[in-house]
Amino acid sequence: MDNADDPSLKLSKFLPRAPHGHVVITTRNATHRLLAPLTFHEVDALPMEESVTLLLRSSANEDNEANRLLATKIAMELGRLPLALAHAAAYILINKCLDTFLATYQESRNQFLQSTPDLPQDYPHSVDRTIEMSFGCLSVRVQEMMTLFAHMDARSIARCVVERAAEPGFLHIPQYSELPPQPDTIAQAKILHDVFCPSGEWKSFEFDGMIGECLKYSLLQLSTTDGEKFYSMHPLVQTYLQSKSSTVCDHSARQLVIRLLASATTVGRRYEFFGFNLFLTPHVRLIRLEEVVEAGDHFGFGDILSEEGDRLGIAHLEQCVRIRKFSLGDNAQSTLDAIVLLSNGYQTLGRVQEALPLQEEVFQKWKQLLGSEHLDTLMAMNNLANTYQLLGRTQEALVLQEEVLQKRRQLLGPDHPDTLTAMYNLSNSYRSVGRARESLLIAEDILEKRQRLLGLDHRDTLNAMLGLLLSLHQLTMEKELDALAKIALPLYEKAYGVDHEYTVWIRSLLE
C-alpha cells in the first residue's frame, strides 16, 4: 500500500488475517505505526553518504573529492530530502552546473521548490506541492501554529517554551517597568492565546492534539531529551511555510514569535533560569534589533544573550537604556536597572572600561535617591567594587567590599545569599593582595554555609569550594588541599564537564 497518507483511511480492514506473509505500507501518517508497533521503520532524511552519491550519479558527475565536497554542501542545504535531491540532480544534469547550483538555488529558492522537472520516475509533484498537500490537510489553527514555528529556529523548539509563555497569557514582559505594554503587544498576546489556548487556557491535551495533526503528515518531528519534548521541522518545510505566509491573523509572524519568546523569558539570579534560557537562546538570536518594540523585551533578550557572551545582547541592552531614558528619564528605577545589566554585559565581553562609568553613575544615583544603606545601593557598590578589582584598583575595591559585607550582615543577616556573595568577593580580593589567612577564614565560612543551605552540588557551593581551594593552594596547605580536591573533582566533572578549565585545574592538584 503506497502513499497511504489520508487519516480517514482505515487500513486495518484491507489487511489479510492470515498468520503468514508480509504487508508493506508507505505513509507520511505517523499514526499508522500503531498497525505494527514493533516492526515499523521511520524513514528519515537520506544519510549524507547516500545523498552525495545520489546527486553525483543522477547528475552524471564524476565521483571525486572536489565534486563530493560540492554535493555535500548541496545535500546539507536541501536537508537530504530525497525528492529535493532528485530534482536538484535533474537540474544539474540538464544545465551542467554542479559548481554553481548552490548559488542559483539560494538566489531562487522558492522558484526551484515550486518547479517540477521532467523525471523518469512517476512522481508528478514539486517539493512545494508535496508539502502543500500535507499542510492543506491541517486545521486553520494548526496551520497558524506551524507558520509561527517556521519563523523560529525550527531545528529545536522546546515544548516548555510555549507552555511557559502561555502561563501569563503571552503578555509577560521580562522586567518590570513603569511603561505600559504597547497596544500591538496586547493584540499579539490575544492572537497567540487564541492559537495555543483555544478553550481559553493552556491545556496539554489540546496542544498535543495540534502537534498530533502535524505528526500525522510528517510536518514536524518529535524527540525527547532528559524528559523535555522538542519539535523540529525539515528545512524545506520551513522554507515553504516562510514563503507561503509571513502573517498570522494580519499580524507579522515574526512579531508574534517575539511576543511568545519574551513571554517565556524570566530574569533572575545568575543560575536560576540558566538551563531554561538555553532553550530560548537559538530563537532569540534570530530576532533583529529593530523588530523589538518593548523596552522590557530588549531587557530580557539582552540578559539571555549577554550571559552567552553574544554581542547582540549588548545591542538589546543599549536599546533598552535609550528607550527608558527617553520615556522615563535618567533616574527611573527601571532605567537604572537596565544600565546595571548593560554594565554587566560589557564586563562579560571584557569591555570593563565601558562598564566602569555606568556603574559609577548608578552607584551615585542610588546613593542620592535611596540612601547609602538601601539594598540597591549596596548592590551597585558591590558591582563597582568588582570592576575596580578587574581594573587593578584593588585598594579601592577592598574599601567598598568591606563596607558592603558589613552592611549586608547588618541588614540581611549572616546567611543571606547576598551576604555570602559579599564574603566571596572579599575573600577573593584578600587573596589577590596576599592576605591569604584572612581569605582562608572567610572561604571556609562561605563553604560551610553554602553547603548547609544549598547542598554540596549547587553551583554557588562549588564556587565557594573553588575559592577555598585557591586559598589553600596559596598557603601550600597540601594535606587540606588534597582532601578537598578529592571531594571537588567528581562534583566539577558532573557540573561542568571533564574538560572545563576548573575541572582540569582541580585534577592537576591530585596528580
Image (cartoon, rainbow, N blue to C red):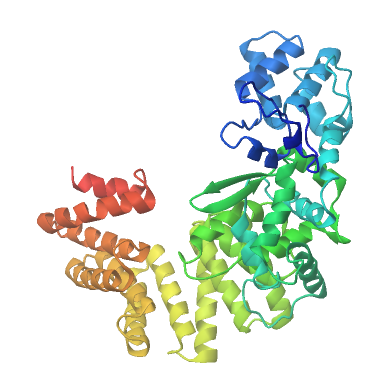
Q: In this rendering, would 35 be left or right of 371? A: right
Is the residue 396 above or below the residue 471 in the image? below
For this rendering, which residue is in front, 480 or 160?
160
Q: Is residue 85 above or below residue 113?
A: above
Question: What quarter of the picture does the N terminus occupy?
Answer: top right
Q: Residue at x 73, y 77 (%)?
A: 326
Which residue is at the front of the view, 304 or 160? 160
Residue 429 as seen in the image, left or right of residue 140: left
Residue 395 located left or right of residue 239? left
Residue 131: x %, y % from top left: 81, 38
Q: Position of residue 382 (x, y in %)?
A: 41, 76
Q: Is residue 344 visible?
A: yes
Taking the image as shown, residue 179 lies to the left or right of residue 335, namely right
Rendered position, 450 above or below 370:
above
Closer-to-camera residue (388/56): 56
Residue 283 image position (x, y, % from top left): 65, 53
